[in-house]
Amino acid sequence: MIVASCLVLTACPGGGGESAGSTGGGSSTGALASSETGSSGAAPTTGDAEPTSTGGAASSTGDAPNGDEVEGCDGASLLAVPEDRSLSGPWPVGVKTVTLGGLTVEVWYPGEPGSEAGAVPRRYDIRGALPDSEQAKVPDAKTPWQDCDCYPDVPVDGEHGPYPAVIFVHGTAGFRSQSLEQMTHWASRGFVVLAADHPGLWLKDLLGQLCGQPAVAQHLGADISTLVAAIEQPTGDLEFLAGHLDGVRIGMAGHSAGGGAIENSGEVAQVLIPMAAGGVTAGAALRSTLVLGAQADKVVAYGSQQSGFESSPAPKRLVGITNAGHLAFSSLCSLANADGQDFVEIAGEFDICGAQFASALFDCLDTYVPDATSWAITNYASSAVLEETLHCADIGDAFASIAGIAGIMAKFPEVGEVLEEK
């Protein structure tokens, strides 16, 4: 299906900045989920294929509170979340596909508790991220459906909030649901999460070049500004969140080139989380930085995260996952069809443009730490920094680098390095 050569979210030169050319960077190049469960209430036709679930790495069990309320920043009313930040929170996750300034944007948000009963979860058909000429090549039975632990258009939980927002920027040849396990996790713990298909950067545009289509310019800075403006004044397609969004408390995360795209966003974002990228620069709003890296990354060397941490302003943390690759912070290595075929194999079978480049860039090895473990580590660390600043929560010694009951290294032996500078 999707050509894996373009699935690798490499930090290409200039990937975080504005590209030359004029293609109207705000224009949408198509929807990711062309046949999603919940969009019309009907499930997509799947033939004989059974979808591969990529739901959260941990469920909200164990120490999950039972409807207790806590106070967030400036008196915000929130539900209590599990102290184990790798566990999902108490909110069912709502989802809505919107258009903001020409961008196709997925919005995951805290839903009204109980509203998910009887609702059909969202299923993403990633063929929508292929060039139009390639989409019909892959039959339903061979498609690696991406199932979401989220429910289209359920009502937002208006009894609590307002909720801080988190903007996620995918990397080179990514797409808006590429890190679904993080998006839904943050929403379940009390954040509104927005992720766009970024013109010129997402899979459809970059793969299109290998299919002979003209290049599309990137305008990532403008894209991010569009999302920030929508958060600050939610109108149009985002009006359903009016009165429920905290337009001041904003976090941003980005994977690979997406991490480079948020590097200079500290003038607006209070929390920045570059993943498999580098560091960030100081800004008037910036209060916390988390640098996440994979120590066996074959695309962006882990040393880039170490040096990025060193150059970033304090307070800051670094978490390195041992024996993990570049795509550890995404769903991509785990998406497979009913026959167990991954992107490389599917792309080759159906002669998708660019398949010949796939094996060199698809950083997925059976010997790596399981994806579910990488997701749990990422969810734990990222939720801790987001909640500390944007929910005004006490996270204790969540990043203790010595063996402590709450320390991330004690919980996850797969964490190879933790650095913290306050």
Image (cartoon, helix red, strand yellow):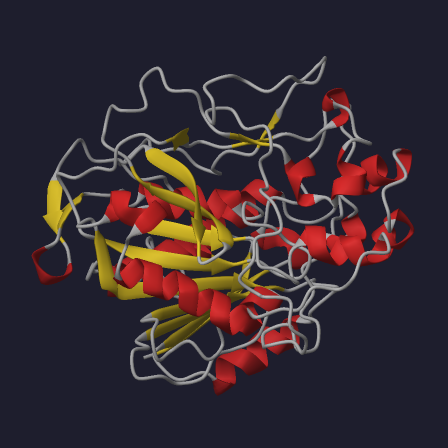
Q: Which of 238 and 95 is in front in this view?
A: 238
Q: From the top left corner, tell me how far across and down residue 422 is, in percent.
A: 32, 79
- Residue 6 in the image, given as x and y percentages of width and height: 75, 55
In this picture, residue 151 sits left or right of residue 275: left
Q: Which of 311 and 93 is in front in this view?
A: 93
Residue 42 lies, with reference to residue 419, above or below; the image says above
Query: Residue at horizontal 77%, vertical 24%?
Result: 139
Check the image and report above or below for 244 versus 116. below
For the point 45% across and 84% down, the residue is: 281
Q: Tell me where residue 125 appears, x and y as whole percent.
A: 62, 33
- Asked whether residue 205 is in view, the answer is yes
| Residue 417 place in picture, x, y as percent | 53, 67
Quadrant containing the N terminus is: top right
The residue under the point 78% across, 53% down is 208
Q: Which of 67 and 169 is in front in this view?
A: 169
219 up-or-down from 396: above or below: below
Residue 172 appears left or right of 373: right
21 sits to left or right of 176:
right
Q: Please indicate, yes or no, whether residue 190 appears anywhere in the rendered image.
A: no
Name the residue at 59% across, 74% down: 16
